[in-house]
Image (cartoon, rainbow, N blue to C red):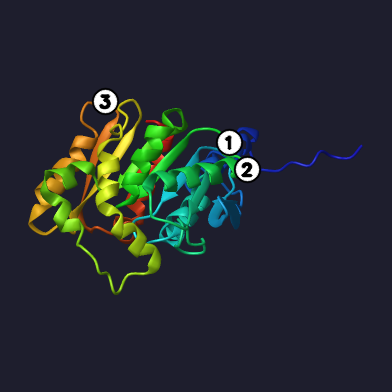
């Protein structure tokens, strides 16, 4: 009979403990690095009311994040944030170009913020978006977020507002700071439509319901807003958005100007993750 081979210095309990420790380290690395699944981002043009609208869609299997750009901007404003979230989460994400901006065709007739919402709703339906969204908006996009929430209260899970324009600021004396009478020689045709209609837009927004009080809202206010000596009013109006909302939060981006998404994408990403988690 052959002799049993002995392996000196190796204890079975040590092997088991080493295996368990390795498994714990691997699990910790996976949690730190986030999902390893590769997400694809594609662009899709959808016909809405005879006009083509461009959507940029990142596929996922969790919360849907909807991005709304500031005035004069398009979906590329959110590219860095959308791509960063795609690498660390399983969110479905949608950014888009409003009529006349980016790759979307120019709408006909006078500008109407109501029409903007109708076009967005149509586009989302065609994309198959049925559940709640976390609506992320910058600047003028705050008006659109408020209007969408007013028309679709059951479809908004949370709001993240980066230095949003507000009815409060316009009504309390800030209107002339944000709007000048025409002409607008350096503005694009799409921008001119929005600027010419701005007084009517403010009136329409003033007649709409305020932001909801029963969902999480994170307002990120810039440390250096584009309103000259009316900074206190700008900031006070941001804080009024969350008054009476137990899930509302006010974040001050002390070192940032109005372009918070471009200057501090990490802060916006953190706000989106918190709003999406509901914690």
Identified at 30% across, 54% down, the residue is 197
> Could you tell me which residue is drawn at 81 percent across and 38 percent down?
4
Residue that lies at the very extreme toward the left in this rendered image: 229
Tag 3 secondary structure: loop
Which badge, 2 or 1, comes first in the chain's sequence? 2
Identify residue for label 2: 9
Tag nearer the camera, 1 or 3: 3
Instruction: Tell me residue 143's x, y (percent).
Output: 32, 45
- Quadrant in the picture for residue 241: top left
Residue 265, placed above or below residue 277: below
Residue highlighted by disc 1 = 20
Is 111 drawn above or below residue 278 in the view shown? Answer: below
What is the C-alpha distance between the residues marked 3 and 2? 61 Å
| Residue 182 in sight | yes
Q: Which residue is at the far front?
A: 109
Q: Quadrant of residue 182?
A: bottom left
Q: Horizontally, is 41 left or right of 136 in the view?
A: right
User: Is 142 placed left or right of 18 in the picture?
Assistant: left
For this orientation, the residue located farthest to the right is 1
The quarter of the rendered structure image containing the C terminus is top left
Residue beneath disc 3: 246
Query: Quick one: label 3 or label 2, which is nearer the N terminus?
Result: 2
Marks 2 and 1, Cα distance to the nearest angstrom?
19 Å
Asked whether the viewer can see residue 164, the reply is: no
């Amino acid at each position: 009979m052959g002799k049993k081979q002995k392996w000196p210095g190796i204890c079975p309990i040590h092997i088991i403990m080493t295996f368990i420790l390795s498994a714990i380290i691997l699990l910790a690395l996976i949690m730190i690095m986030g999902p390893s699944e590769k997400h694809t981002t594609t662009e899709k043009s959808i016909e809405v009311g005879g006009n083509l609208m461009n959507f940029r869609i990142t596929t996922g299997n969790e919360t849907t994040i909807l991005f709304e750009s500031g005035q004069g901007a398009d979906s590329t404003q959110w590219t860095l944030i959308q791509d960063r979230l795609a690498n660390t989460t399983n969110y479905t994400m949608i950014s888009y170009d409003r009529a006349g901006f980016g790759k979307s065709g120019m709408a006909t007739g006078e500008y109407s913020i109501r029409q903007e919402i109708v076009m967005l709703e149509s586009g989302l339906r065609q994309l198959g978006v049925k559940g709640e969204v976390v609506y992320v908006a910058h600047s003028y996009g705050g008006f659109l977020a408020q209007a969408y929430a007013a028309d679709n209260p059951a479809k908004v899970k949370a709001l993240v507002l980066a230095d949003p324009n507000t009815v409060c600021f316009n009504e309390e004396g800030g209107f002339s700071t944000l709007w000048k009478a025409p002409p607008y020689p350096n503005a694009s045709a799409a921008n001119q439509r929005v600027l010419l209609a701005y007084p009517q837009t403010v009136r329409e927004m003033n007649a709409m319901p305020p932001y909801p009080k029963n969902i999480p809202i994170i307002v990120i206010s810039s440390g250096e807003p584009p309103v000259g000596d009316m900074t206190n009013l700008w900031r006070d109006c941001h804080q009024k958005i969350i008054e009476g909302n137990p899930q509302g939060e006010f974040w001050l981006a002390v070192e940032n100007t109005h372009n918070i998404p471009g200057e501090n994408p990490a802060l916006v990403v953190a706000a989106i993750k918190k709003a999406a988690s509901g914690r």
